[in-house]
Structures are given as C-alpha cells and as structure tokens.
Image (cartoon, rainbow, N blue to C red):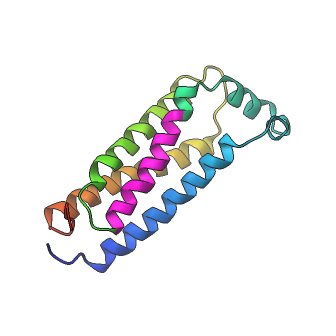
Amino acid sequence: MHKAPKWFVTVAVLALLWNLVGCAMYLHEVMLSASDVARMGAAEQAYYAMRPAWALGATAVAVWFGAAGCVGLVLHRTWAMPLLVLSLLGLIVQDAYLFGMTGDLAIPAMAYLIQGLVLLIAIGLIWMTRVGTRNNWLYSRG
C-alpha cells in the first residue's frame, strides 16, 4: 500500500461531512410531523402526500450508503466502492422519481441544480475510489 496524497484524504473527509449533512436532512425529513407538513406550501404538501415509500427508501440508500462509503475512504478501505455504487444507484432511483414520476407537480429549478451537483459528487467519489484503488491508496484488510 502507498500513502495517499493529502488531497485524497482532504476530499474524503469533506465528502464524509457532505454525506453526513445528507443523513441529517434525511432524518429531518422523515421526522416531520403532520403539523410540520401542514405549514408547508401546497406544492410541498402534495409532494409529501404522493411520494411512495420506495422513493423515500432510495433516498435512505443514497445518503446512508454514501456516508458509509466515505467512512471507507477516510479509512483507506476498498470496501468503500460497493457502498458508493449503491449510494449512486439510490440517488438515480430517487431522481427518477423526483424528475420523472411526480406528474404535474412543479419542480423548482433549484432542485435540478442541487440534484445535479449531488449526482456529480457521487460520480466523483466513485472515480476517486477507483483512483485510490489503482494507486494502492486503499486496501482491503488491516
């Protein structure tokens, strides 16, 4: 195993923090009470009312596997790769629902921007894991 460069470690730590924010946002969302939802605008209320459990499950897969995969990167472990791939798949399913199956619900332009950024980061983390594996910065045991 070779020592990972400082940029790799820095990006891994920042990615872990990024994914932990995603986990916090997910927990906030699933813990909304009926009165919290009632205070939202009509479009947001409609979104929460119509979203199927599998779409929420895809979000859970995206954030929790993403965070776990980033822990793997911080620890320089090859097992980060399958976790980050599962995270990306969860993100793709989540976005397929959000942008393709919400019917007439108006999706704000900012949602496209944010989800595009999230998608680029998820792909970037997989690329980074491949680079780390190829350069022997990640290992499987030890």
* Badge count: 0
The quarter of the image holding the N terminus is bottom left
Q: Toward which corner of the image does residue 111 lie, by quadrant?
A: top right
> Relative to 83, is 119 on the left or the right?
right
Give coordinates of residue 86: x percent, y percent. 36, 42
> Relative to 60, is 106 on the left or the right?
right
Give coordinates of residue 98: x percent, y percent. 55, 31
Of the pair 123 and 30, the residue shown nearer to us: 30
The quarter of the image holding the C terminus is bottom left
Q: Toward which corner of the image does residue 13 lie, by quadrant?
A: bottom left
Q: Is residue 63 magenta?
A: yes
> Relative to 131, is 111 on the left or the right?
right
Q: Is residue 103 magenta?
A: no
Extreme residue toward the front, this view: 142
Extreme residue toward the top, this view: 103
Q: What residue appears at the point 67 percent right and 25 percent down from the top-left corner? A: 105
Overall secondary structure of the magenta stretch?
helix
Q: Toward which corner of the image does residue 76 lie, by quadrant?
A: bottom left
Q: Which residues are magenta?
A: 57-74
Q: What residue appears at the point 54 percent right and 47 percent down from the top-left corner? A: 113
Q: What residue appears at the point 47 percent right and 29 percent down from the top-left corner? A: 96
Give coordinates of residue 140: x percent, y percent. 19, 60
> Relative to 133, is 87 on the left or the right?
right
Q: What residue appears at the point 28 percent right and 60 percent down from the top-left corner? A: 128
Give coordinates of residue 97: x percent, y percent. 52, 28
